Image (cartoon, coloured by chain):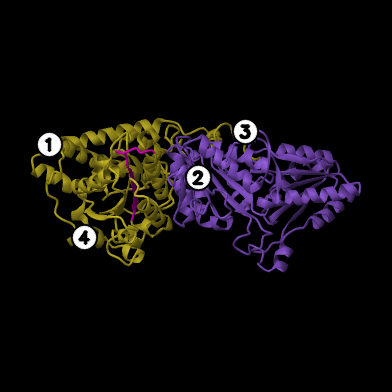
Amino acid sequence: MAVAATSTVMNNVEAVRHTLYEALKADERTLILGEDVGARGNVFLITKGFIEEFGAERVIDTPLAEASIVGVAIGMAMEGLRPIAEIQFADFIYPAFNQIVGEAAKTRYRSNGDYSCPLVIRTPYGGGVRGALSHSVSIEALFYHVPGLKIVAPSFPADMKGLLNAAIEDPDPVLFLEHKKTYRLVKGEVPGGHYTIPIGKADVKRAGDQLTVVSYGLYVHYALDAAERLAAEGMSVEVIDLRSIRPMDRATILESVRKTRKLLVIHEDNKFGGVGAEISAMVAEEAFFDLDAPIRRLCGPDVPAMGYASTLEDEFMISPEQMATAMAEMVRF
Amino acid sequence: MTNAISTPTLERHGLTDDQLRWMLNNMFVQRTLDNRGFQLNRQGKIPFATGSEGHEGIHAGAALAFERGRDVLAPYYRDMGLCVGVGMDPLDVLLSMFARAADKSGGRQFPNHYTNKALGLLSISSIIAAQCPHAVGVAYAMKLRKEGGRAVLCTFGDGATSEGEWHESINFAAVHALPVVFLCENNEWAISTPRRDQMAIEDIIEKAAGYGLPGVKVDGSDPIASYAVVKEAMDRARSGGGPTLVEAKCYRFLSHTTDDDDRTYRTREEIESHRHLDPVPRFERLLIEHGILTSDEVSRMKKDVLAEVNEVTDRAEALPYPAASELYTNVYEGTYEPWL
């Protein structure tokens, strides 16, 4: 794999692959561990060829046991390595919940800084790919409650690279969420050379002055699509790509809401206790008197999962058309 | 079980008189610190204490098999004696009990949940077996860096061997032939649950065979035998021979913690039937019988240990709690702005 000095068009799979490759090449403390990351090169072929180049000791096909994938990575991190653990699908992360929440997130805190846990846990999440109950979930709400963790969910290839580099270099544990439907669907310019994007900074992907839309992952792209349609009808919608879920960029959200005076949060994860609940509460606490309309959340339905049948999946997912309708209602309010 | 425990002999396994005396002294320190925790709790000075009475033999033996400055210890909460044995200052035990600012965790952690990176002692939680994969990760790092001569000692109780993370860790270590020794301190009780309700086998080492690593059983009330078995396993790990599961049979003489009342689940008779295994008087007698120490020297040793524990108790008690503002530090590296 050649290192491009200038920018290249990549999809999200290529951006993640390129960034991991550069990290393994640049720092011998880094290693990748997970299920089928070696000979198979990851189920999405993200690490294809890595084992031949970096060896089986640094590209580890682990036993099929998620708690120990994360737990062993924690030990490696405590001992000075820079492990990049992979959970094959976000749906499989539940067995590792204790290691992530009970251990990684509290290592620095409980040792009062004696130990740290510089660990990245990458995992593909999200639906719209006919992944049924156990290959479609969003997991961010289960983890974003936890201080000590950082959670990143980029949606564009350039952000994938910059934030993955930041995650790998971060001195604390980072849960790195990759929406699997964007893997090959989304393409974009990725700058050459090494760069990072600060974790905790949102990005205004489209400027507007009549409504603030906050989203992340696949739905940033759908929201941008919807905003573009509404522009043709003379409506001006600002779209913020949250990029980092924890820490969360309250300043960017508040600045935008104070300008547009309306807030719509869109996410694929279900509404109850979701990321939108925290954003809505924060805006209600901080900017209530700046609002011209009730805050609205457009989220996945409050059911255990999306079904395998296309009808059930389609019912769960929110389309750009549905987003455009909600946005237009908010603008007209 | 009684029959499986051998009468201690003075097979030295290469240990010098000084090392034997060190072990007895360490066992007195353990017992005295243990008692101190319960006393301070009953006096209302500390909210909680955990004892390891009955584990002194395996703690002293394993501590001597641990190479300070090289090896790493992933302990569990009943390992106060082992942690002191590998170099932790008794004052740190008291600072932990009193939750003082000078405690290594800054007064955050429960007693017996230590951290000491300088000593190679991993920070742990109370979650049973959660430290096992960490031990494996550290061992992996040692192997990756080709740091021969180093190994990890990972300890846990019998109940931990029911946890998924325990099985995952043993398997991972065996697959990669990692330099780690898994040491089970089998004291027959997981709070109120006896071994027979925890597993359908008599010996925990039977679990080793399924994962392809050697399992070795030892009388954990005997510090010399414990030393010999742990030392052999650690040496094998250090020289590239892979992991071992060691089972140290011992007995928990106290309630699980100061918040537990073992009268609700086990008889006094059962405890007394194990009294002859109490490692401290047993080893004391052995060293006197073999002329390693005189009765007077033993009495002086006990007195000195008590004086030291009294002294560190007073010192720790006199120190301040952490400032309330410390609640907000070390969440992440650098300054932290909590979500308000």
A126 or A293, which is in the foreground? A126
Real-space Cα distance between discs 1 and 3? 74 Å
Kindly identify the amino acid type of the residue bearing the numbered disc 3.
Answer: Gly
Quadrant of the image containing the C terminus of chain B = top right
Q: Are marks 4 and 2 in contact (CB under 8 Å)?
A: no
Quadrant of the image containing the N terminus of chain B = bottom left
Which mark is on residue A104?
Answer: 2
Give the class, few, some or many, for how many residues have Cα within 10 Å of label 2's Cα (few <14, many ≥20): many
Would you say A30 lies left or right of B65 here? right
B296 or A59, which is in the foreground? A59
Give the class, few, some or many, for how many residues have Cα within 10 Å of label 3's Cα (few <14, many ≥20): few
- Mark 2 vs mark 3: give the one in front: 3
Secondary structure found at label 2 = helix
Q: Residue furthest front?
A: A2
Give the class, few, some or many, for how many residues have Cα within 10 Å of label 4's Cα (few <14, many ≥20): few
Chain letter, colour yellow in render = B
Which mark is on residue B273?
Answer: 4
Q: Are marks 1 and 3 on the same chain?
A: no
Chain letter, colour purple in render = A
Secondary structure found at label 1 = helix
Q: Are marks 2 and 1 in contact (CB under 8 Å)?
A: no
Span colored in magenta:
B145-157
Which mark is on residue A193?
Answer: 3
A73 or A187, which is in the foreground? A187
Determine which quarter of the picture holds residue B114: top left
Residue position marked by numbered label 1 in the rendering: B296
Kindly identify the amino acid type of the residue bearing the numbered disc 2.
Answer: Ala
